[in-house]
Amino acid sequence: MASAAEQLAANLNLGVFSKATELKQRIWFTLGALIVYRIGTYIPVPGVDASVMGEMLNQHGGGGILGMFDMFTGGALRRMTVFALNIMPYISASIITQLMTAAIPSWEALKKEGEQGRKKLNQYTRYLTVFIAMVQSYGIAVGLESMRGSFGPAVPNPGPFFLFSAVITLVGGTMFLMWLGEQITARGVGNGTSLIIMSGIVANLPGAMGSLLELGRTGALSPIFILAFLVLAVAVVAFIVFIERAQRRVHVQYPKRQVGNRMFGGDSTHMPLKINTSGVIPPIFASSILLIPATILGFSGSNAPGWLQFVGNQLSMGQPLYMALYAAMIIFFSYFYTAVVFNPEETADNLKKYGGFIPGIRPGSATSEYFDRVLTRLTTVGGLYLVAVCLLPQILISDYGLPFYFGGTSILIVVSVTMDTVTQIQSHLLAHQYEGLIRKARVRGRR
């Protein structure tokens, strides 16, 4: 028999949505904030000829860390706007904070302190975001001063004043996006940071689809191949949704206990363990590390030493060595990040503290070993899944010359964020229905 929550979820429809006034306000706020973000991606940085950056990215085929950032920013880096860094420094700072929380005991104690500890960790993350944004913006500003395009230099008037203004502008844009993401999370629907990144990726899709159809019109790609590509895209999205929702449910039993003449407890539940516990972190880490030589080579140009040019060519997208190292690093970071976010010993101790146990497994160390064994198998499957999704675009680009980055980190982010946002909308609708039932029950009780 369906539970009350499942019955309410089955009754969700447009009529319920039209009555959820607070949810509609949250959705409108989210859309308005994303529109502000997209407008900011067209406000240029003073003193920069943005066409030179676009020319450089076109020459290198969008490769390197700059190309990956441009994909995440929705073209803001190509146009050299105030949001050129996007919110990526905040993402990097958040990941570093999570890793440091697992490595530093004092930070781990802050994490367990509740709301106050969380506020302190958020403050550390903001400070680290400012530092990372300053380093990245300074590197971009110095690189812009040395760039020259077919129509002249990227910075007509280089010097200390340009470096100062560029760093202040780019860091200010990143901090504004960090604040905007927090506002979306608090007053809108979904995770603000993830929605900002997703909107940047989705903004590139119309142009990418236009380029694909243009290749079909000119005869560079056959209509049958384009149709097969679209079918493959739908199949990959369905596969990602299936894996991201897949769980290994560990059965947990709580014993009965007697209080006076009554028996309490004896409940059974399950602990869901996701197949892909690490999310999109492994592909981001692996891409960032492997594309550093290509990015340095792109800034150095013909002045780069021979060994760096050889390494950059071997580690360029589509090369066998790049694919092999990319797959190995994805699997490594899948295990590493899963070990950071899920502690088998702590989970087993919490179960033992509250009287829970897994049927057939002794509480304590045996339960911890069981969690570790199950999580290792799940992480292996999750790592192979990430490798398959992330290597597919490499094969399509290198062998078939597709005009945009299909799959990989971008499609993982889009699908995951969409699923999380839909889940939050359903949660708001369920809460609205519960509030309506409670109000009706109170009115009947007064009568």
Image (cartoon, helix red, strand yellow):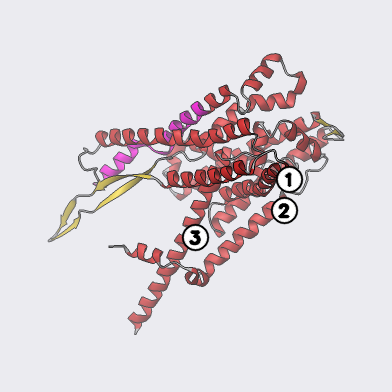
Q: Residue at x 36, y 33 (%)?
A: 376
Question: Residue 349: x and y, percent?
Answer: 29, 40
Q: Give the prevailing secondary structure in the magenta stretch.
A: helix
Residue mark closest to the camera, 1 vs 2 = 2
Check disc 2 and report the residue beneath it: 39
Which stretch did the figure color magenta? 327-355
Residue 271, visible in the rendered structure: yes
Going from the N terminus, do you reach mark 3 or mark 1 first?
1
Kind of residue at disc 2: Ile
Check disc 3 and report the residue beneath it: 425
Find residue 82 and name its label: 1
- 298 vs 445, nearest the viewer: 298
Whether the magenta-drawn stretch holds residue 336 is answered as yes
Question: Residue 271: x and y, percent?
Answer: 32, 46
Kind of residue at disc 1: Val
Going from the N terminus, do you reach mark 2 or mark 3 first?
2
Q: Are marks 1 and 2 in contact (CB under 8 Å)?
A: no
Q: Element at badge 1?
A: loop
Q: CA distance from mark 2 to mark 3?
A: 26 Å
Badge 1 density bin: few <14, some 14–19, many ≥20, Cα 10 Å: many
Q: Are marks 3 and 1 in contact (CB under 8 Å)?
A: no
Residue 233 sits in quarter: top right
Q: Quadrant of the N terminus?
A: bottom left
- 436 vs 330, nearest the viewer: 330
Whether the magenta-drawn stretch holds residue 253 is answered as no
Badge 3 density bin: few <14, some 14–19, many ≥20, Cα 10 Å: some
- In the image: residue 382, left or right of residue 224: left
Q: Are marks 2 and 3 in contact (CB under 8 Å)?
A: no
Going from the N terminus, do you reach mark 1 or mark 2 first?
2
Kind of residue at disc 3: Ile
Q: Element at badge 2?
A: helix
